[in-house]
Amino acid sequence: MVGHEAMRRIDRWLGVPVCAALSGTRRIARWWGGGAPGREQVVRRVLFVQLAESGSMVLADPAMRALTARSGAQAYCLTFAHNRDSLAIAGTVPPERVFSIRTASLGVLIADTWRFLRELRQARIDAIVDLELFSRLTAALCLLTGVRRRAGFHRFDGVGLYRGDLYTHPLAFNPQLHMAQNYLMLVEALFAEGAPRVPAAMLVPRVRRREIGAAELSAVKVRLTPLIGTEIGRERLILVNANASAMLPQRRWPQAHFVALVRAALGRHADVRVLLIGGEDDRATTAAIAAQVADPRCVDVAGRFALGELPALFTLGEVLISNDSGPAHFAAVTALPVIALFGPETPVLFRPLGDVTVVSAGLACSPCVHAGNQRRTRCADNQCMQRISVAEVFGELCRVLDARAVGAVRSATLVEAGA
């Protein structure tokens, strides 16, 4: 598989000359009277490009829905194959309108990119919205599709990577706005003749709540019950995600801190059970935490549920404690409260949507990854995460659990009064 660092090197050493060459070609075409944006074209089908970030799939959901609300156009999406399930979490783009590129090897990556360019022409896409902020080659890919209306982030004299002059509707990335708001502005820019206006919906981007079917929920319950050894609903479930992608391991809160937090939660609350969640690749971490906690009420369920089953699992929980990673964003499609731990990245841009409490140490060196450095950092000692105290996170956890308990009592009282 082509790794994250290899992707960055390819994007840097190939992306810069390719974007420069294509920009020059585009300027020549404009001098000869070609390359017009085609503003009179009716936009019926729009391709969103979001390749690498699974959590960003959820952050992009308000923009995809805003597209349909604004123009009635259908949303399509291009992503890496391993992120298809992440896109399905929100469910805005149906599977038949998703293009994917595999990254098993460089040869497969090139072959799938060529296949995508052929298939896209058959789909008759009218416009492209490039959501990528950390990739140069997506800008070149958008131009090579032949689609004449293209919106994407352009650095002008501000923040961002050099990506040439390849968009017909360029927009400056605004580091003062949340990423979901920046995505919404790209959709607005696609239709704007001049500077895009600020839509009211941009002020509070929201992800559409998923409707969890009875069969879907029942299937998760059937598989979860033997794992926790008790009937669902008898105890409150605390979900813990101690993992973060290999792309930025500095986002991990120390394993010892998670162990101490779980022990404290089980010690204070007799009616809770902790579920350690994650994928197959995370089982070494979750198994180690479960072994150190050494309490039967701490259950390792990593790898037991597919990504698409997380919304159903989340509906059974009381709260999720998570590093800044995919599950913290996926929870936004449910009502599950989230306590998200931030360090190398800023919650100003990447705070998960939904009911979220952000905990950060607030060090002067944080955030150290941003649009200007392609999310690269030389930090080998993530003090920004280590200095988030167990006591602070535990305090937030108790606050959420106590508030949920009070809410449950009030709801029960209202039901009894109505009866």
Image (cartoon, rainbow, N blue to C red):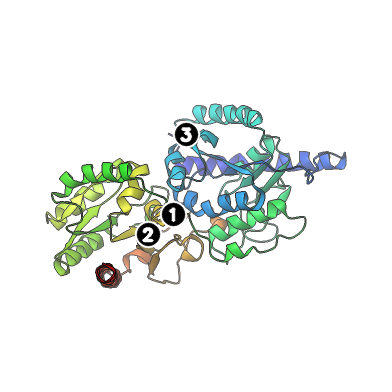
Sequence-earlier tag: 2 or 3: 3
Cα separation, mark 2 vs mark 3, equals 34 Å
Separation of marks 1 and 2 at Cα, in angstroms: 8 Å
Q: Which residue is mark 2?
A: 335
Reply above or below: 67 against 419: above
Give whichever of 117, 316 is nearer the camera.
Answer: 316
Horizontal arrangement in the rendering, residue 50 relative to residue 403 (left or right): right
Q: Is residue 374 left or right of residue 334?
A: right
* Residue ID at (41%, 72%): 362
Q: What type is the residue that disc 3 sits on?
A: Thr
Q: Position of residue 286 (x, y in %)?
A: 24, 50
Residue 264 image point, x, y percent: 18, 67
User: Disc 1 marks which amino acid?
Assistant: Arg
* Residue 408 in picture, x, y percent from top left: 27, 67
Q: N-terminal of the two: label 1 or label 2?
A: 1
Label 1: element kind: loop
Q: Does the rendering let one see residue 39?
A: yes
Q: Are marks 1 and 2 in contact (CB under 8 Å)?
A: yes
Q: Alpha carbon of mark 3 to alpha carbon of mark 1: how far? A: 31 Å
Q: Residue at x 43, y 38 (%)?
A: 82
Quadrant that contains the C terminus: bottom left
Q: Nearer the viewer, mark 3 or mark 1?
A: 1
Residue placed most toward the observer, 217 or 247: 217
Quadrant of the drawing holding the N terminus: top left
* Marker disc for residue 209: 1
Q: Report crowding for label 3: few under 14, some 14 to 19, many 20 or more residues within 10 A (C-alpha).
A: some
User: Toward the viewer: 48 or 8?
Assistant: 48
Residue beneath disc 3: 103
What's the residue at 14%, 65% (across, down)?
Answer: 270
- Residue at point 59%, 62% (across, down): 201
